[in-house]
Amino acid sequence: MTVTYSRTVANAGLGTFSQLLLRWRGSIYKLLYRELLIFTGLYCALSVTYRFLLNEEQRRLFEKLAIYCDQYANLIPVSFVLGFYVTLVVSRWWGQFESVPWPDRLAALVGGHVRGEDEGGRLTRRTLMRYANLSGVLIYRSVSTAVYKRFPTMEHLVQAGLMTAEELRQLEDLPSPHNKFWVPCTWFVNLALRARTEGRINNDVALTALLAELNTVRSQCMKLYSYDWISLPLVYTQVVTVAVYSFFLACLIGRQFLDPSQGYAGHNLDFYLPVFTLLQFFFYVGWLKVAEQLINPFGEDDDDFETNWLVDRNLQVSLLSVDEMYDSVPLVERDKYWN
Amino acid sequence: MTVTYSRTVANAGLGTFSQLLLRWRGSIYKLLYRELLIFTGLYCALSVTYRFLLNEEQRRLFEKLAIYCDQYANLIPVSFVLGFYVTLVVSRWWGQFESVPWPDRLAALVGGHVRGEDEGGRLTRRTLMRYANLSGVLIYRSVSTAVYKRFPTMEHLVQAGLMTAEELRQLEDLPSPHNKFWVPCTWFVNLALRARTEGRINNDVALTALLAELNTVRSQCMKLYSYDWISLPLVYTQVVTVAVYSFFLACLIGRQFLDPSQGYAGHNLDFYLPVFTLLQFFFYVGWLKVAEQLINPFGEDDDDFETNWLVDRNLQVSLLSVDEMYDSVPLVERDKYWN
Amino acid sequence: MTVTYSRTVANAGLGTFSQLLLRWRGSIYKLLYRELLIFTGLYCALSVTYRFLLNEEQRRLFEKLAIYCDQYANLIPVSFVLGFYVTLVVSRWWGQFESVPWPDRLAALVGGHVRGEDEGGRLTRRTLMRYANLSGVLIYRSVSTAVYKRFPTMEHLVQAGLMTAEELRQLEDLPSPHNKFWVPCTWFVNLALRARTEGRINNDVALTALLAELNTVRSQCMKLYSYDWISLPLVYTQVVTVAVYSFFLACLIGRQFLDPSQGYAGHNLDFYLPVFTLLQFFFYVGWLKVAEQLINPFGEDDDDFETNWLVDRNLQVSLLSVDEMYDSVPLVERDKYWN
Amino acid sequence: MTVTYSRTVANAGLGTFSQLLLRWRGSIYKLLYRELLIFTGLYCALSVTYRFLLNEEQRRLFEKLAIYCDQYANLIPVSFVLGFYVTLVVSRWWGQFESVPWPDRLAALVGGHVRGEDEGGRLTRRTLMRYANLSGVLIYRSVSTAVYKRFPTMEHLVQAGLMTAEELRQLEDLPSPHNKFWVPCTWFVNLALRARTEGRINNDVALTALLAELNTVRSQCMKLYSYDWISLPLVYTQVVTVAVYSFFLACLIGRQFLDPSQGYAGHNLDFYLPVFTLLQFFFYVGWLKVAEQLINPFGEDDDDFETNWLVDRNLQVSLLSVDEMYDSVPLVERDKYWN
Amino acid sequence: MTVTYSRTVANAGLGTFSQLLLRWRGSIYKLLYRELLIFTGLYCALSVTYRFLLNEEQRRLFEKLAIYCDQYANLIPVSFVLGFYVTLVVSRWWGQFESVPWPDRLAALVGGHVRGEDEGGRLTRRTLMRYANLSGVLIYRSVSTAVYKRFPTMEHLVQAGLMTAEELRQLEDLPSPHNKFWVPCTWFVNLALRARTEGRINNDVALTALLAELNTVRSQCMKLYSYDWISLPLVYTQVVTVAVYSFFLACLIGRQFLDPSQGYAGHNLDFYLPVFTLLQFFFYVGWLKVAEQLINPFGEDDDDFETNWLVDRNLQVSLLSVDEMYDSVPLVERDKYWN
């Protein structure tokens, strides 16, 4: 359910980005409105307390407290730490996307090098590609909430046609406590070797190229696994969160409108709601939300990668490439520029 | 219609960059003048209201409001967030350019490894290259406004000589809802395999090298597709836009020239038009425009990639390489430094 | 004992990151509480001194000193230098993780290309993989505290089954003062060549692919070694540390609550404990802690890489791949989408 | 005429960088002195006007204006935008340098794989390398001012021995409006294929390796061409230039020394020349000059890449490698450590 | 003499980095103490002048000057420009380290593919590796002060056993003014081809792999050469140096303690020595020192790469790999987990 808006902003015109402000899906409003309500609620509560519940002396104290808070809130370099942190999160997010394994390249090689129109050949090609897809899905199950919900047990993979019952049995019989995404890759290798022996793959260079491509897929799976395993250090995330939250805690008090009649500097107007503080909230917490959304792009946020779509697309394209389209070339004829 | 100015600034002399300020095509003025007019208009409207329409009491209130706005406008760290955001957009922009597939490398291999001066050989080479180009164009159609306008239907591709009617039929018959840019790649593989069987490609190493190169083109197409599919998270773009826009909303009021006779600090001059605020507008909104222009470099902005030019150039160079220039070497003679 | 929290934050909801604030393992609290106690202790000591031990005149002097300290503390650009430094440390940290050698790709090739179900074949495959793993462990011993503790002597490697006594003897007999992690790689090459001669590896392309993959593992080991050898320049780390520490030394005095009755600007409230300074401490020293934790990710911090787990996992997966699973493919049958 | 100073600063001693301040070639002084003179001239003109030409009332107005300018000059975040922009320019600059094609790797393969000491062999090897160099030079002609001046017409390339008259004729006969740098690459491929047929290259693996290496050179040429074609978006450069220039326009007025007797805050000294503003000018405009110099490193600035030197060096080394040194190995004898 | 401290900071504990503050070798103190003494000396001289040598009127003038300097010193964005510049220098520094050629990978291939236990085989292998090492050393001589001191003439290379007298003669006879580091690479290629002809290398795939690996070493040498040739533009270094130096020149005057009795704001205490300015000096100049130390990591600073160690290590490991360990595999026996 990735939010794609590139086409909307293809041409830079009058306030191009402003049209994006009216979207709801994947928008900052959808992500932020609850936090904003809470903040506003607390602010109003404090405001009411200050205006109606405190006595004269308490109000003077509160005013001093507010000025103190306001003064120190500005010492917290929220924008700085958010800038560096979000940059880091974004680069990991894209790194994860680039690690998503696409079986297309492998399908091209399997479709080209594994020969034979007989059932044996078809079976080999389809099975090879199924193995490559299966490896990916096994990884997705361990990193993506959405895929895990779709395939809560390995049985579901069998039902979805991604693996056979026999394969599941063998996978589960393998005595290893570690993630077994690599097992279908090993089957791939073994089946490819068998195809070489049977002459379906007719030369060693092709076999080596196939294995190299398979290893690329395997490396990408492992990279996804690593990104999931090695999160950004918890401390960094906590530091940023503490900075943003404490800044707004300070603002809750420090940005109260104080009694203009007391003549505090910068407090000669009373708007009841601090528009600019709300904008700052919008802005800083929105920035933090960017990080919250991207830190694990395999969840079910509006802007997360559509892994289930990927699973379906990859399986279909793989099978089409190596089976339906096997050895099919449209009639080769002279093109328009032939002379 | 990319704006190339490298040569103008080849040598750093007296105010090298200043000559760039006088350009119109692709310039900040062209991108910005409407926004600037709107901002100035609103500013003047407010100014007139303050000066002539408000009564004494309302003016005092407006003055307080202006001072309040001015004070808080400076709390919004526009330059910070713009710096990080634009850096990100620029790196994606260049990443997209680097993903543009050039068929040159593939053409070199096809021209070298697919032998035969007879019609069969020529047909094979030309068709292989046409397939590689076709894959690219199918992707361009889905990411680039300009190419889509040029080829609004697949029929147009047939008319342009990029594919034959038969190929179009087969492409459309393929039962898959997903983008089919990879189909010509599969045809390429199948045709290359056939050429190997027929002996036009006379060894397996060459075949493997050809397929590897084809897969590189395919990966680049997929990368372009991915960049289009996975936009920068909407939230980030919204946060930046909100920051810039709210900053200038605050400036509309906060940077009004207040009655000097009231003696507000920093308000002892009345210029009617706030030159420096307009410069800031120029500067910040201009920076945002950099992002607006680069976020989708496949549109029709002055500075977007010229994909239609690419389509033509690539097809021509491909066909020249593998057909006209097939096996042609100028007379090999002793060079000047021969001894 | 890496702290994995990706799944907790898969979906961005109401204050997603706030749940992370309650963790202890790998948290900022665990890393920071001692420094915080020390800082608070010193602050209180100074506070008590100022309030009760100094005479009137000394207090006036202390007040001037405090104001002076406060004023200059803000001149130290702590957030700036921390931002750049931590970004650097984080990129090295991830660079190190990406250099961790995984033998999976190599195992796929060994399992595929080294043929023979007899004892000789099994021995060759297992030994090849053991060599690759051994190289990694030799590097880990020199860079990772945890692995070094597990294998304090080379004898322990023999006991753990990673090498044989004979291998240890030969390794130690080699007259070289430098790190010998590369020796098992050389054995690997020699054994692979022998397997080629014996016909277990039946073609040269496969052999070359194997050696290339082995060289990748070797390069990664060397990279880990390099990261350990070439630390971030000591000067940079010292500059950052001095900046942070001197900032808080200045705060110890400068952020004391001065007698409100003296009427110093900004000193009209007395909270006894400077909440915001503690938050700043939390924030800046927490940021520094991120660097302290990541600068050597092969230690035993909560968030360091689990090298011992890696050693076990890699050995097991290697041996499973090339031995138990050798040539095993589940029954190849028609998949669900067969038509 | 690149300015190399690495050796001067090999060791960090007392003020290592300070020795660099005394250089003229490629220095900031050489680049900046004209701008500095202009700025100083304008400043003095304004100063004289204020001091001697204005009447009392006008001077009061000017003073208000100056204070206003000074106040707003500081709102322009020059250092921020310059930091991000220059970082970008520097990374492109280095990217361009890394795209410069060196034929050394190709020469090693040509010298190794194209056999034969007879004239045919020599001719083939020399011609192959000449083609690779020619491709580079064709690109240089289109991106580098210096190389273009050296070879203003294609005839000059013939005279310089980089191509023969026959080759020039064929190149010009090719019906294509696009840059033809790739044509010599195609000749290379065709000649290499011919050498394979004639048995000068005696195996397909070698041929494939040769073509792969040639394609690397070709890709690098194309990268140089792309960097030249796709400049940094004009808008970004304009934004930065406007920011810097408008800052110093504001400074011209805002940093005037006002009559101390008027008692404006911060204006109780009159130095006639604003040393710190000049330093700021030096500093900010110098930073911008870094960008001006690096944005096109193929010009004739002191610090631009010496493309003409490259052309000569590459041709010489190529021919030496594949001809004079063909098959030459010094007598292989026991080295010092032989035992 | 790289300063390795990774192990000291393996675990983040109480003030982990604080232990690093007590080091001398490679420390900021060692690099900085002279500059600090000079700065302090000048400061004191000025201080004494102000306090004792100036008359009343001159002191008033000096005070105004000091306030003026202090005010403008803060306008120089030292931390900003240092942050960007040092980041750049650090990335080049690591880029240079990654370009250091390690012959290990090549040694694995030479040891594996060049067969024969007779003297001819041994000679070939040893000579091949010696050539690869020699190329590296020729580059080191031109980039590294330390290596140049060790081998001031080419004769020294002969004495050190890195080349033979005959090789030196041939190298010097080659008529080329350019750096000749590539000549041993060419010899390598020629010798490898001869070994192929003689059947010591028994297949073309192996030969091609060898040449590819050699080319990798050659590219890395060329990269080192390029880093040395193309320094960071002098202008950038000068801009940074000017910024830092002028900041501290301003501080020399601006941070003087002025007579408290004059009642200047912020000048009501007299400490004689400006602790915080010294800390700032420590901090900013220390940051600049990071750049000074890293800008050429091939010097003889405490923290520079130990090129001489590399030369020795690489030669020894190369020869061990291809000769002593040639074809040696420990007895292959069942491992502990055999079942």
Image (cartoon, coloured by chain):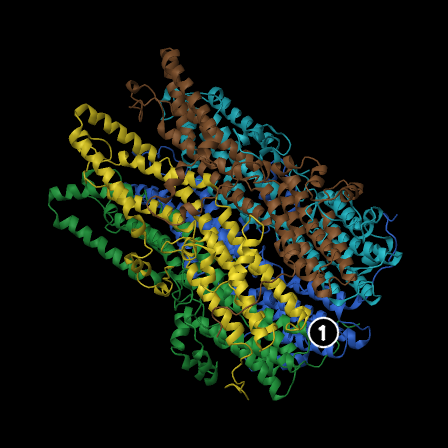
Chain colours: A brown, B yellow, C cyan, D green, E blue
Residue E293 seen in this snapshot: no
Residue assigned mark 1: E127
Q: Residue at x 60, y 47 (%)?
A: A313
Image position of E142 with respect to E36: above or below = below
Image position of D209 with respect to B26: above or below = below
Q: Nearer the viewer, residue D74 or C121?
A: C121
> Which of the image's four quarters has the N terminus of chain B?
bottom left
- Residue A12 on image: x %, y %: 36, 49
> Which of the image's four quarters has the C terminus of chain B?
bottom right
Q: Decide if residue E6 is on the left or right side of residue C180.
A: left
Residue type at mark 1?
A: Thr
- Residue C218 on image: x %, y %: 70, 57
- Residue A138 on image: x %, y %: 68, 43
> Badge 1: how crowded within 10 Å, few (<14), some, or many (20+)?
many
- Residue E55 on image: x %, y %: 28, 43
Residue B17 seen in this snapshot: yes
